[in-house]
Image (tube, rainbow, N blue to C red):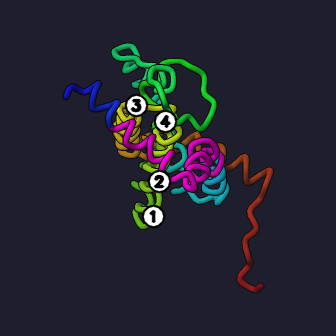
Amino acid sequence: MDFSEMNVTIFRMINDLGKQFTSLSPVMTFIAEYMVFFLALGVILYWFNRTRQNRMMVISAVVAFVIAELLAEIAAMLHSNNQPFAELSNVNQLIKHAVDNSFPSDHTILFFSFCMTFLLFKKRLRYFWIGLAICVGLSRIWVGVHYPGDVVAGAILGIFASSVACRFVPKLILVKKLLGIYEKGEQFILPSKKKSRGA
C-alpha cells in the first residue's frame, strides 16, 4: 500500500465514524469550526494577564505560526491535493469549505503552533494543550475537509516551528526591548492596580 492509498484508507476510517456515531458529529463539527475562537480568547487572556512570561509565550506562538505558515507555502509547492470531498465519493462532509489545496492543514498548523508553544512554556498544562491540538486535527478529518496527510504535515510544521520559536524568541534582545516599550505605554494608558502595603 503506497502513501496515497494509506492516506485515503485512514481518511475513510475516521470520516466514516461520523456516519456510525452521529451523536458525536455536532461536537466534532463545533471543534472543527469554532474552537479557533476559544484559542483566540485564550491568547487574549494570557496577554492581558500582564505577566512577562505569558506575553513572551504569546509572542513566541505568533512567531511559530508565521514560521510554520512560511514552511507550509514551500510544502504546498512540493505537493498538492484538494479536499477529500472534492476528490472522493461518499464523503461525510459536515461543514462547507472552498475547494483548494488542502495540503497542509492550516487549522492544524495554527493549533499545533500555539498549543505546542503553550505546552513548552507551561508544562503543567501539557496534556490539555496537546489534547486540544490533536482533537482539532482529528475533527478536520471527521468533517471531511482534510486528509490525515494534511493534518500530520500541519502538526509536524507546527511542532517544529514552535520548538524553534521557543528556543530563540525569548532570547532576542529586540523582542525584549519592544515588549518593554509596549508595557511602558500600556502602563501609562492602563495603569495596573497594585495594593499598597498599608491597605
Q: Is residue 166 above or below residue 187?
A: above
What's under tag 3, amino acid-wise? Answer: Asp
Other-residue count near label 4 (Cα within 10 Å), few / some / many at <14 / 14–19 / ≥20: many
| Nearest to N terminus: mark 2 or mark 4 | 4
Which residue is the site of mark 2? 118
The residue tagged 1 is: 125
Residue 65, disc: 4
Mark 4 → mark 1, Cα distance in angstroms: 20 Å
Which tag, 4 or 1, sits closer to the chain's start? 4
Q: Nearer the viewer, residue 183 or 71?
A: 71
Please identify, in this view, whether the residue under mark 1 or under mark 3 is nearer the observer: 3
Badge 4 or badge 3: first in the primary sequence: 4
| Residue at x 51%, y 57% (from the top left corner) | 53
Residue appearing at x 39%, y 13% in the figure: 77
* CA separation in Å, label 4 and label 3: 16 Å
Q: Give the SS element for disc 2.
A: helix
Location of mark 3 (residue)? 150
Point out the residue furthest to the top here.
77
Q: Where does residue 157 sit, x and y in percent of width and height?
A: 37, 34
Residue 33 lies left or right of residue 128; in this view the side is: right
Task: Name the residue located 40 percent from the left edge and 31 percent from the top edge.
Answer: 150
- Look at the image and tell me whether residue 44 can be seen: yes
Q: CA distance from mark 2 to mark 1?
A: 8 Å
Q: Are marks 2 and 1 in contact (CB under 8 Å)?
A: yes
Q: CA distance from mark 1 to mark 3?
A: 26 Å
User: Is residue 161 part of the magenta span, yes or no?
Assistant: no
Q: Which residues are magenta?
A: 10-38
